[in-house]
Amino acid sequence: MGSLFKQIYRYTRPKSYRHNENLWPWTKITRATSGEICGLNYKGSAVPLVDLSALKGSAQGEVMLTATGPSTAEIDFKKLPGTLPVMGVNGAYSLAQDVAFTLYLIVDMEFFDKRSDLVESIIADPGILLFTTMHGIAKILDRHATRLKCRLALIEDACYKIYQPKVADEMKWQTWQHRESIRFCADRQDIGFSTDIREGIFDAGTVVYWALQILCFMGFETILISGLDMNNFQQPRFYETAENKLPSYLENKVDNLVIPSFAHAAKIMKENKSSVLNFSLNSAVPDAVFTKVFFDDYFKNR
């Protein structure tokens, strides 16, 4: 039946709506005046969502963002202050015995498909607020509904909003040029950064770029990042082995997309009086973009 609905959707709507074909007709949404999805019904049942407007400016100070590069394994997370909020991405939950995650972010659908063991642990944690897309929520509800205890915050790729047409790279600037909350790179109109995630989040090939937009929207002033290596892509992520390593698609995007996007983010964040410190000392992301700091030195007297 699902494939029939998909075919009906595909042949009754323009190609620019194709990213919605697996959601219709199971997904019914309501949007707030500020743009975000505020009401969700999936397969006949209401799905509670955290109000994104309530998160705007709700935080302050520092936050730890645990990315998953191999260098994360070199850090002793027991030294983290217990009061420091921590956001994890993808397989960072492997640190749960040493880290109390309160925020989480998954936008990689392959991670949902291939690492269901970690997904089940993350969503079963009632202390977590999980940010994910509608496609991620659908996978959770279809496969793990009985284990769901975390709170859900529905976010969207600004170029692939639910039941709205896709926005091509060459149309980004034209589409959002008048929105004060969306800032474009001066010499790259395909690189955007949203200071209001209710308008959508811009992708740059890495989940960390999504995280920066979310954490800035929440009001954090200093973002501390571990595992932001952006090199050694042939090595397993810190939580993987050679046998269960998922492929990385970043290597060919680092120079032409990822680092220019991070440089743009750093500029916007500086203007908003926030900053990023990178605990990956051998990261491919230059020190001029995100200042590199030795983890032990930073927390020495904390």
Image (cartoon, rainbow, N blue to C red):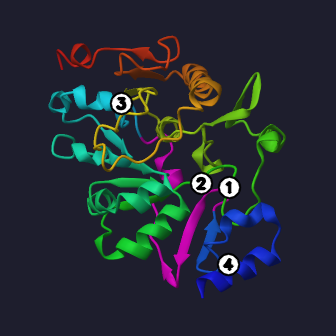
Which badge, 4 or 2, comes first in the chain's sequence? 4
Question: Nearer the observer, disc 4 or disc 2?
Answer: 4
Which residue shows up at 80% across the image and 77% down it? Answer: 11
Near-viewer residue (102 or 230): 230
Q: CA distance from mark 1 to mark 4?
A: 17 Å
Q: Is residue 166 left or right of residue 259?
A: right
Residue indicated by mark 4: 6
Return the x and y of residue 66 as percentages of the image width and height.
34, 36
If the image is split into quadrants, where does the N terminus sit? bottom right
If the image is split into quadrants, where does the C terminus sit? top left
Return the x and y of residue 246 as percentages of the image width and height.
41, 48
Q: Are marks 1 and 4 in contact (CB under 8 Å)?
A: no
Which badge, 1 or 3, comes first in the chain's sequence? 1
Q: Are marks 4 and 2 in contact (CB under 8 Å)?
A: no
Q: Amino acid at mark 2?
A: Glu
Q: Is residue 172 left or right of residue 51?
A: right
Which badge, 4 or 3, comes first in the chain's sequence? 4
Which residue shows up at 28% across the image and 43% down it? Answer: 239
| Element on which disc 2 rests | loop
Is residue 103 something that shows in the picture? no
Residue that lies at the very extreme toward the front in this rendered image: 243
171 up-or-down from 6: above or below: above
Return the x and y of residue 148 as percentages of the image width and height.
33, 69
Residue indicated by mark 3: 227
Near-viewer residue (59 or 85): 85
Please provide the residue range marked out in magenta.
32-58
Residue indicated by mark 1: 160
Which badge, 1 or 4, comes first in the chain's sequence? 4
Which label is found at residue 156? Answer: 2
Which residue shows up at 75% across the image and 22% down it? Answer: 186
Which residue shows up at 59% across the image and 32% down it? Answer: 252
74 up-or-down from 173: above or below: above
